[in-house]
Image: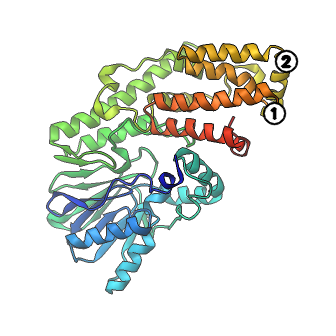
Amino acid sequence: MDKAEQEKPFLIVGTGTETVAPGLHILRGQGQSFVAETDAGLVVIDAGPGGPVTQGMIDAVRQLSNAPLHALCYSHGHVGYNSGVPMWLAHAAQRGDAPPRVIAHRNVLRRQARYRETEALQHRMAEIQFNRPASFFDRRLTMHAPTETFDDRLHIGQGDSRIELRWAPSETDDAIALWSPSQRVLYGGAALIDSIPNIGTPFRTMRDTVRWADTLDALAALGARKAVREFGATLEGEEQVRHVLTHTARALRWLRAEVVRLMNEGFNERGVLARIRFPDELFGVEWMKPTYGDPGYIVRDIYRSENGWWDRNPTSLHPEAPETIGRAVAEAITDKRGVIAHACSLAKEGRWQLALHVIDLLAIAEGDAPEIAEARSLKAEWLRERARQVPSYVSRNLYRVGADMIEQGTQGRFGIH
């Protein structure tokens, strides 16, 4: 990815608005935000990432209505979605309107406290996950505390324009949905996307698979005629909405049951991953494609939820430093050319993943010996090949960033090998 490509906004789905029902609109920005026209004023879900994107969102809203902004609401606590809050507040002040309410689920406060404590880590993880240059997120991931929070439900407005904010724990434990009872329109936010649920992302804390399924079942029970997703096309018709939500919930429950079955048979994490098969009837449908996450990621999260960190190899209980291990393994291999030749033969057969396992015997070692340098170069090349094979956006980026760091000699700074 060149510098121009890296500087493009990420997760931006376009500009403008789309009306889904009278007074209810999709607002495009970082993901699909939402606008509800209520008798109390406008309610906007997500302020956007700031800068030109948020300004475009504000301009788009003003094409819809001149009503005052009553509330800004956080769809969930991931930072970039609401970095643009100050711009909306300034806009309200310029109009002479009262400051809008800034509403979030109570758990957002705890998330923001954690993000402040681990700020450098959060920025590094985001750089790698989204394949961005160093310090890209230092000026983008700004946090703004809500002025009020709620636990389960919050009602805004009266009569036919009344809306409900509902706790919808899913990708995060602070996610919310918006429900219009009179028009039976649902905005699902982070709980409802057009790919397999984003559980088990390699850099993130655990996300509860069954709780996400519970949320989808609860949203399905509302009987929505339309459901707006954070990413992807709007679901149309009560039958389609219920089918997509309950199908996704059923697939998540199947994953939980199958991983537990294999754990009960005694398999460790890699053993479970090697044996699990994802049935097409559950995972072959359009809205379960692994375009961002991956079913294997979910398997890992479920496994971690019932296990400790140990991989069942006693050697790993009290390990030496990675660089010390790499050096000792490389020194122990007297036929380094043989290791490289065997790894290359696997690569020629198209067995890229197995080739990576073999080349790691040398590639993670320190030093500039010719065989070590060649092993690193081959690993970088094969990581890029693996990136071309996987559909998951996150996996592709991790492969590509890993290759870049190997070639730049910066992998140690990020703990990547």
Q: Position of residue 24 (x, y in %)?
A: 20, 60
User: Which of the 4 quarters of the picture holds residue 280?
Assistant: top left
Q: Residue at image x 70%, y 30%? A: 376
Mark 2: secondary structure: helix
Q: Earlier in the sequence, mark 1 or mark 2?
A: 2
Q: Amino acid at mark 1?
A: Asp
Residue closer to the observer: 247 or 289: 289
Residue closer to the observer: 220 or 323: 323
**Mark number for residue 368?**
1
Q: Is residue 258 above or below residue 286?
A: above
Residue closer to the observer: 221 or 60: 60
Measured in 3D between alpha carbons, the distance from the residue under mark 1 to the one under mark 2, in whole angstroms, is 17 Å
Left/right of residue 146 with respect to residue 58 in the rendered view: right
Q: Is residue 242 above or below residue 101?
A: above
Whether pointer 1 and pointer 2 mark residues with C-beta atoms closer than 8 Å, the reply is no
Residue of label 2: 332
Picture quarter with the C terminus: top right
Q: Position of residue 216 (x, y in %)?
A: 32, 40
Q: Residue at image x 73%, y 22%? A: 361
The type of colouring in the image is rainbow
Q: Position of residue 128 (x, y in %)?
A: 58, 46
Q: Residue at image x 53%, y 53%? A: 3
User: Which of the 4 quarters of the picture holds residue 89?
Assistant: bottom left
